[in-house]
Amino acid sequence: MMGILERALSKLTISAYQDRELRKEVGRIQAMYNPESISLNYRTDYAPDEYINSTQQSNRYQQVRPGELNLQLVFDAQLPGNKRTVDSQLARLRALCCSVLPETKETPFLKVEWGKMSWSGHGYYAGRMVSMAVSYTLFDRDAMPLRAEVALRLSTDESLLLQKSIQGLSSPLVGTLSVPDMPSLALIAAGIATGAGAAGAGLDYLALAVANDLDSLNDVSPGDTLVVPVEGEV
């Protein structure tokens, strides 16, 4: 029975960050996830136009609301190799999703990763917690929780730099790059310039740092997303 349960679940990683650009990680947790379905919701608001002495009907666009992701997570103390209690895992999840960080006075920005799920091409989902509902489904004889299911609802809250690049609101931003496993920003810039040929000949690591509002030339990690500027437009 346990083997069937393990095959029905897979690991999902939730990482928490201080900043919207997902650079300063404060912690992460892995949870078992039931991959039968993923619920991503989007909503647009419209206001009805009012006509006097007319039966005409039309709507006027107001705004597109952030998308929402709904996850059903499973915490089971009986799974092989699981050395943490259900209570300790839930406390860790609450700390990562619900706590107000003293440095920012904000709740953490979350990055959700699950296998090869592309999440609209980004490789991850970025958002913040809206609600968390915990259901305890199994206890031992001393009322110690052995299994719990968590309904986690997140609201999309993505990198502003990435949004500008995608929406084309800032002309210097022409593309994005996922940071590879390279030791320095200089090598990353050199790799971009080599791949772009003449179009990227003027790109240097300082321009790359300015375009991404980096506090330090070492303030990048593998998997981060960088915006690539146009030559001479930084």
Image: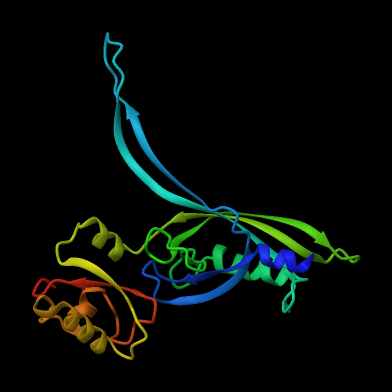
Q: Residue at the location (70% across, 72% down)?
A: 88
Work out which quarter of the rendered image holds the C terminus and state it.
bottom left
Q: Is residue 152 left or right of residue 64?
A: right
Q: Position of residue 144 (x, y in %)?
A: 83, 66
Closer-to-camera residue (96/124): 124
Q: Looking at the rendering, which quadrant does residue 104 occupy?
A: bottom left
Q: Is residue 24 above or below residue 125?
A: below
Residue at (10% x, 71% y) in the render: 233
Q: Relative to 26, does residue 52 appear above or below in the rendering?
A: above
Residue 219, position as x, y percentages in the image = 34, 83
Residue 16 falls left or right of residue 172: right
Q: Position of residue 83 (x, y in %)?
A: 73, 79
Q: Is residue 188 left or right of residue 9?
A: left
Judge whether 78 appears above or below 165 on screen.
below
The quarter in which the N terminus is drawn is bottom right
Q: Residue at x 44, y 62 (%)?
A: 125
